[in-house]
Amino acid sequence: MRILKLITYYLFGIVAILCISVVPQYISTMKVPDSPGLFNQLALLIGEFVKPGSWQYVIQSTSATAPMMEILWPAFIYSMQILLGALAFGFIIALFFAMGAVFLPKSILESIKKVLNILEAIPDLIFATLLQVLALTVLQKSGILLFNVASFDDKAYFGPIVTLAILPLVSMFKILLLMIEEEFLKDYVTFAKSKGISKYNILTKHVLKNIMPISFHHMKIIIWGTLSSQFIIERVFNVHGLTYYLLDGFTPITIAVTLMLLFTPFYFFFELVDLWLKEEPLHTYEVRKTNWRVIWSDKYITESVKLNISNMVFSLKHIKIRKMNPLRPFLSFPIIFGHHMKNWKFALGSIFFIITISYSVYYSVSTDNHVDQERLFYEDDGVTLISAMPHAPPEPFLLGSDRRGFDLLDQIVIGAKYTLVFALLIALLRVIGGLLFGIIYAFHLKPRLQHLLGKIVDSIHFLPLSLVAYILLAPILMPTMDGFAYSFSERILLEILILTVVVVPLTTILLGKEIKRVLDYEFISSAKVLGGSRFHLFWRHILPHLGPRLTILFGTQFIQTLLIFIHLGVFNFFFGGTKLSFDPFGGDPPSSITHEWSGLVGQIGRTAIRGGMYWFLWILVAFILAILAMQLIIQGVKEVQQVKVGVLHRVPKTRLKKVKTKTENPAINQITKESFKEMGRGV
């Protein structure tokens, strides 16, 4: 029965992969007359997918074909060597660092945590670039090649593995450190210490055994992020892995097989380990036995669906609009915001966004999005040439220019509003969508159906988010010789919709489980006894309780959106569309229509590595500052919430008032009859 469940969930994942794979072709042919519909194209893809012997890889540049697995299998092995090497290296180093950090003084440990927060804010593209710059610099100075900076005749391993290992190293180290600290607060550790057992033995023989099953489940999230990072690391180091061949043969069957190769090993590995660590519920669906066969109870399923729908309709009918007051969040927001602004971390992060977005809007309105350009920069005499484009800072521009001579600072200022506002909007929609569907998940679905949806959504962790975004956005953001298939507003709306929808299932399960956890609290039981409806429970009790959690989730989704922008920018996928030149004799490089920040990354990122244009890092510094500002907001919300429940981060220093005593004349301090009476009257 468990094996049947395992295979069933796997087939659900394959169906989702096939649906994703057919979307690019459907979107690109949607406006073509007599083009087959979505379901017809999906049926054709399924018919081709179930015949592995007929899989053909089509090289778009030459239209040549070859058996698909002969092309993709070696690339898959190469990519897995890099990925597994990075994960093993990162997890092992994180484990040793976490074990060693337990024995450090608290002051040093706090400093290490601050450094880790900064490292998490640095995009993986910067680490890859710095490693390549280091290898090239050493080669120029000493003639020694430390490692291959790109794959050509020889495959590159060291650079991609080290760069890719940073994310799992930092993330796992923070998780292990947090769990070890929490574990040392438990009673059995105190008891072991009272027995005279050393801290090292407690850590190795007891604590690590208890936290390993929990840390294993955190690995899914870490691997999900690492898979997305590998998508661009292979591009930067010119690795001919799955990414290279996916882009070179961008057809529905190639997309489906590539995602299946990534999905299958991780799915079965984690599911089998889950079965080993924890037994699942014995019954996922209600069944009945007839003639020695187990079949689905159609009557039960129909009645269950009807019951769920009737419950939802009943809840909607009993929503009290008058008490709901939709303006309540907007009226209470200034009060809550002002209260949080007393925390310096929250205030500093919020001020960054307010000032940056406001100045970007002001600059665009006052200058009509003007960007200074200087192709050739001369001395004051107008004859002596100082530099040609691209210009290095600080002259003629403070932060330098791109390859076309446009001022980087002007582009960063103009693009700030598009990058930050739309990243905030996408993060907000992910949270709101997850909350709305999370309510249905927690209040109207039975545990068995919740478990089923949870297992299906859990499969998304094995598909790289950046790769899925690339696949879905390819026909929308990239123009053809005839121009864009969609207008500017349509491209923005579709990109917002896609980047929101691909994550909403995950936020739904996350917030749904959070709502269920709150429903188990005692004060919720008391409210139910007093006759509180589901709407009353959610609006008056659960929503205020989820407020800090929603803010933290919003911040993490914002950071994730910025990282996706960077990853897409490496492949010249810019927010709002990419401006391409189809001049066969050369033309301008791909550029962003809106000057948003990922467009700058795509314009000069790889050129900077080859040509020494190191000032392009200012673009990534803008991303880092935005991520750090959001991290400050998240940390500020956590501290404000913890202070509410009695967890103080900093003990206020009490001022010791100096009491001046007149010790010069001892007679003044002596007790006399009159002073004794005065003390009595004072009492």
Image (cartoon, grey):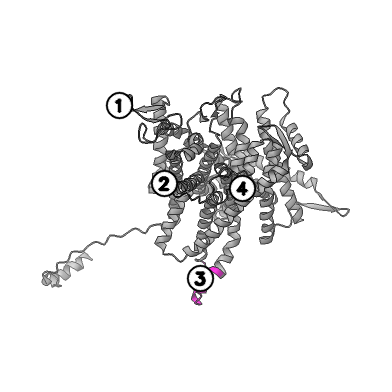
Give the class, few, some or many, for how many residues have Cα within 10 Å of label 1's Cα (few <14, many ≥20).
few
Task: Using residue 245 as the reference point, say whether residue 369 is left or right of it.
Answer: left
Residue at the spot of label 4: 509
Tell me which segment is drawn in magenta.
186-204
Amino acid marked by disc 3: Tyr
Using the rendered view, name the quadrant where residue 355 is placed: top left
Please name whichever residue, 185 or 368, is drawn nearer the observer in this view of the structure.
368
Displayed quadrant of residue 92: bottom right
- Report the residue marked by disc 1: 380
Element assignment for label 1: loop
Check disc 2 and give the amino acid type: Phe
Q: Nearer the viewer, residue 436 or 522?
A: 436
Work out how far the residue at label 3 is from the one at label 2, CA to CA, in angstroms: 38 Å
Residue 108 lies, in percent from the top left, at: 41, 61
- Residue 52 shows in the view: yes
Marks 4/1: CA–CA distance:
64 Å
